[in-house]
């Protein structure tokens, strides 16, 4: 089911890109990153998490703290 969720969030992001909208963009990117982490794909999650952390206006900015980023980086390094 996690794989299904990641596909759903990717589709929403792609639809937004094609229609030049940002409908639930912050949520879709955050939950796609979380889905990648659930799927043990930290290398896919990291760019999304870094994007979120680089934008203080992002709704999920405070959810992506330095500890989470460190854990993801460590997970990537172990692979």
Image (spheres, rainbow, N blue to C red):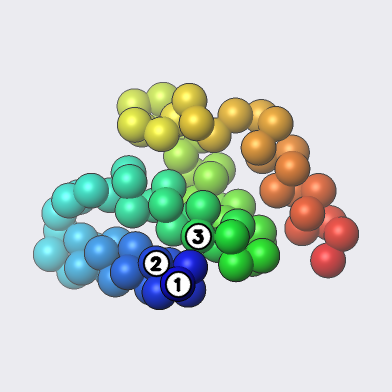
Q: CA distance from mark 3 to mark 1?
A: 10 Å
**Is residue 15 found left or right of 70 in the rendered image?**
left
Where residue 70 appears, as percent x and y from the top left, is 74, 38
Question: Among all residues in the image, which is located at the extreme right?
Answer: 78
Q: Name which residue lies at 51% across and 53% down.
A: 34
The answer to whether residue 5 is above or below residue 23 is: below
Rendered image quadrant of residue 59: top left
Q: CA distance from mark 1 to mark 2?
A: 6 Å
Kindly report which numbered mark, 1 or 2, lies closer to the viewer in this rendering: 1
**Is residue 48 found left or right of 40 in the rendered image?**
left
Residue at the disc numbered 3: 35
**Is residue 34 found left or right of 65 in the rendered image?**
left
Residue at the disc numbered 2: 5
Say if mark 2 contacts mark 3, CB within 8 Å.
Answer: yes
Mark 1 falls on what kind of element?
loop
Q: Name which residue lies at 15% across and 58% down.
A: 20
Q: Residue 29, which numbered label? A: none
Residue at the disc numbered 1: 1
Can the viewer see residue 42 in this picture?
yes
Q: How many marks?
A: 3
Say if mark 1 contacts mark 2, CB within 8 Å.
Answer: yes
Where residue 40 appears, as percent x and y from the top left, is 66, 65
């Amino acid at each position: 089911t996690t794989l299904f969720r990641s596909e759903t969030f990717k589709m929403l992001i792609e639809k937004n890109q094609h229609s030049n909208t940002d409908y639930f963009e912050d949520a879709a990117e955050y939950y796609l990153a979380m889905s990648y982490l659930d799927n043990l794909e930290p290398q896919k999650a990291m760019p999304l998490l870094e994007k979120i952390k680089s934008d203080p206006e992002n709704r999920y900015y405070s959810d992506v703290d330095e500890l989470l980023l460190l854990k993801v980086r460590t997970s990537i390094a172990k692979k």
